[in-house]
Image (cartoon, rainbow, N blue to C red):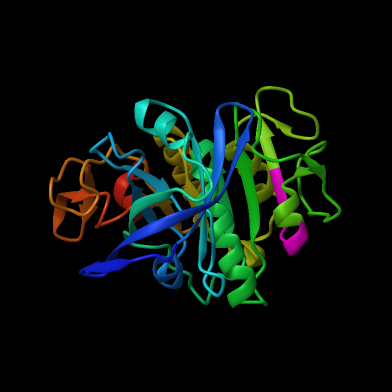
């Protein structure tokens, strides 16, 4: 079945066809859809708004985890948290899902910061995978490091990393096989005692590694983070401790996801003063310090 599209500004409405739908522990799923128009435009940090079931009018926002623009497919990692995501988990290969994508402001890479630290927590993992993929294939001389945290089983088989990382916490050796295959160093953190993972929060693991770097090395680092609000606040705090720029992708409940309802607004500090910004279209990526101002 071929996909059909229509435009709404820079956002496409596309009939995405389910290619693969895999279940993992912890009610987690990876959904792959054929959506060539959206895949051709998507950038790390953006998301899609999916119709979970014809019987459910409200769509659900999902962060984009991987894209193959040439093959025309997109991957989404999600966890069942309510009626919509449970309905989505029942969609089978060949089903058509109405999708709005890509939506929102993406992460911005800076040429003078070629050692990005990517921090993902829980359902905040997907944008970090997409960003690592984008960096690896678009900028071969960059050196990303990915750190992921989860308090439920990771949606992949943990693998001891063969990529050594100077300054890494003792015993933190588990990695994501996909990133390992790309040659991207990755380390995992949890409080659940999973083998090879750092015993603590992922932001604490980031603090350990950043603390091992000299001033010259820190000058090359920028922090990118996505996850629950407390994790993002902690990531911004860690970045501030080391004087690093930091971008965060916020997670908010969304109704329309295209800026019309203003139901996902957050308080942001701007040059003109405090302002309410819509996470869906003004974000979801923001400068971390505009959302989580450093303590005086």
**In the image shown, does 114 or 51 lie closer to the viewer?**
51
- Is residue 263 shown above or below 7? above
Please tell me which residue lies in front, 242 or 123. Answer: 123
Which of the two residues, 49 or 166, is positioned nearer the viewer here? 49
Q: Is residue 92 left or right of residue 8?
A: right
Q: Residue at x 64, y 67 (%)?
A: 216
Whether residue 101 is visible? yes
Q: Is residue 133 above or below residue 283?
A: below
Quadrant of the snapshot with the N terminus: bottom left
Which corner quadrant of the image does residue 270 belong to? bottom left
Residue 276 x/y as whole percent: 16, 47
Residue at 37% in and 53% down: 48
Q: Residue furthest front?
A: 1
- Residue 242 visible to an observer of this rendering: no
Q: Is residue 78 above or below residue 217?
A: above
Q: Is residue 8 magenta?
A: no
Residue appearing at x 45%, y 69% in the figure: 36
Q: Give the position of the C terminus as an image quadrant.
A: top left
**Residue 74, image x and y in percent?**
50, 59
Q: Position of residue 200 (x, y in %)?
A: 65, 29
The stretch of residues the image draws in magenta is 181-187
Where does the image place residue 72, in percent across and percent down from the top left? 51, 68
């Amino acid at each position: 079945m071929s996909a059909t599209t229509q435009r709404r500004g820079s956002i496409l409405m596309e009939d995405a066809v389910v290619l693969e739908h895999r279940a993992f522990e912890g009610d987690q799923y990876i959904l792959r859809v054929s959506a060539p128009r959206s895949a051709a435009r998507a950038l790390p940090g953006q998301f899609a708004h999916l119709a979970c079931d014809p019987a459910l009018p409200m769509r659900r926002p999902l962060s984009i985890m991987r894209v193959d623009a040439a093959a025309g497919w997109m991957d989404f990692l999600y966890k069942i948290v309510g009626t919509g995501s449970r309905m989505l988990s029942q969609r089978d290969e060949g089903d058509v899902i109405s999708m709005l994508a890509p939506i929102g402001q993406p992460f911005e890479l800076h040429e003078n910061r070629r050692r990005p630290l990517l921090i993902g927590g829980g359902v905040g993992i997907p944008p970090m995978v997409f960003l690592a993929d984008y960096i690896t294939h678009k900028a071969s001389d960059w050196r990303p490091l990915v750190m992921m945290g989860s308090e439920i089983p990771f949606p992949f088989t943990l693998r001891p990393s063969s990529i050594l990382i100077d300054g890494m916490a003792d015993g933190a050796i588990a990695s994501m096989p996909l990133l390992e295959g790309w040659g991207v160093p990755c380390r995992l953190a949890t409080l659940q005692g999973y083998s090879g993972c750092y015993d603590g929060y992922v932001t604490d693991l980031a603090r350990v590694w950043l603390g091992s770097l000299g001033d010259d090395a820190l000058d090359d680092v920028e922090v990118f983070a996505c996850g629950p609000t407390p994790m993002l606040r902690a990531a911004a705090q860690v970045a501030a401790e080391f004087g690093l720029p930091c971008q965060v992708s916020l997670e908010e409940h969304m109704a329309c996801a295209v800026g019309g309802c203003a139901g996902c607004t957050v308080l942001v500090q701007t040059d003109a003063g405090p302002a309410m910004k819509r996470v869906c279209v003004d974000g979801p990526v923001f400068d971390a310090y505009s959302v989580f101002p450093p303590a005086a």
